[in-house]
Image (spheres, rainbow, N blue to C red):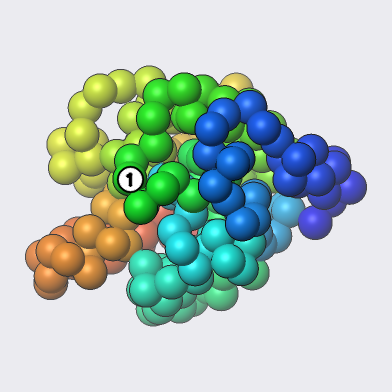
Amino acid sequence: MSTALQALSEEASACTRCGLAAGRTTVVFGSGSATAALMFVGEGPGAREDEQGVPFVGRSGQLLDSLLAEELGMDRSDCYIANVVKCRPPDNRDPLPDEIAACRPYLKRQLELVDPTVVVTLGNFSSKLLLGTDVGITKLRGQVYRFGDPERHLVPTFHPAAALRGGAEVLDRMRADLSHAGQLVEAG
């Protein structure tokens, strides 16, 4: 991890900007390569992530790891993985607008420091936040969007938990989205 990313992680570990801080075990800042061309952004940590301090380590993370290997020939250490909120919402509820707003500066800075070529948003919350839209993931996915300064490619796809619940059709769409992201990374 770069020095600047490490300093930001340490700052986040002491954060009390929203009510989620009171119920967390660990701040789940992010993991992976600080110079990754590919960055994944999910919603927020679950119970396992809160215990271990690492994003996507539960069932959804296991699926993401498999998809990374199968579709992109990558390991999670080759990319960077973060979430919209850094603390676990109680009972895995959706993050609230004030919680998202409190964590947004951390995610913005992570994007600046890692400086990926391609960002894959996993699910509604990260897709809506980074694209500044109210349109849901089902309508957003399957396309590539340009966003940010410097301009990056954003590929929205389903959250791995949706693929676990939704079966083969959702998983196939997710595979196609990740394959497309991989092509964009290769193209530079």
Horizontal side of residue 110 vs 41, given as left or right? right
User: Percent from the top left, x then y, of residue 17?
Assistant: 63, 27
Q: Can you see residue 131?
A: yes
Q: Which quadrant would residue 11 be assigned to in this image?
A: top right
Q: Is residue 182 above or below residue 93?
A: below
Q: Can you see residue 150?
A: no
Horizontal side of residue 79 vs 172, given as left or right? right
User: Percent from the top left, x then y, of residue 99?
Assistant: 49, 29
Residue beneath the point at 43% across and 71% down: 58
Q: Is residue 113 above or below residue 17?
A: below
Q: Residues within 10 Å of mark 1 (few under 14, many from 20)?
A: few
Please give the residue where the numbered disc 1 appears in the rendered image: 93
Q: Is residue 18 above or below residue 187?
A: above
Residue beneath the point at 41% across and 53% down: 181
Furthest residue in direction front, as rendered: 22
Q: Which amino acid does label 1 sit on?
A: Arg
Horizontal side of residue 61 vs 134, given as left or right? right
Q: Which of 155 and 126 is in front in this view?
A: 126
User: Percent from the top left, x then y, of residue 68?
Assistant: 44, 71
User: Percent from the top left, x then y, of residue 137?
Assistant: 23, 40
Horizontal side of residue 172 vs 133, given as left or right? left
Q: Which quadrant would residue 174 be assigned to in this image?
A: bottom left
Residue beneath the point at 56% across and 74% down: 75
Residue beneath the point at 47% across and 29% down: 100
At mark 1, the secondary structure is loop
| Count of all numbered marks drawn on residues in the image | 1
Query: Quarter of the image containing the N terminus?
Result: bottom right
Q: Which of 104 and 156 is in front in this view?
A: 104
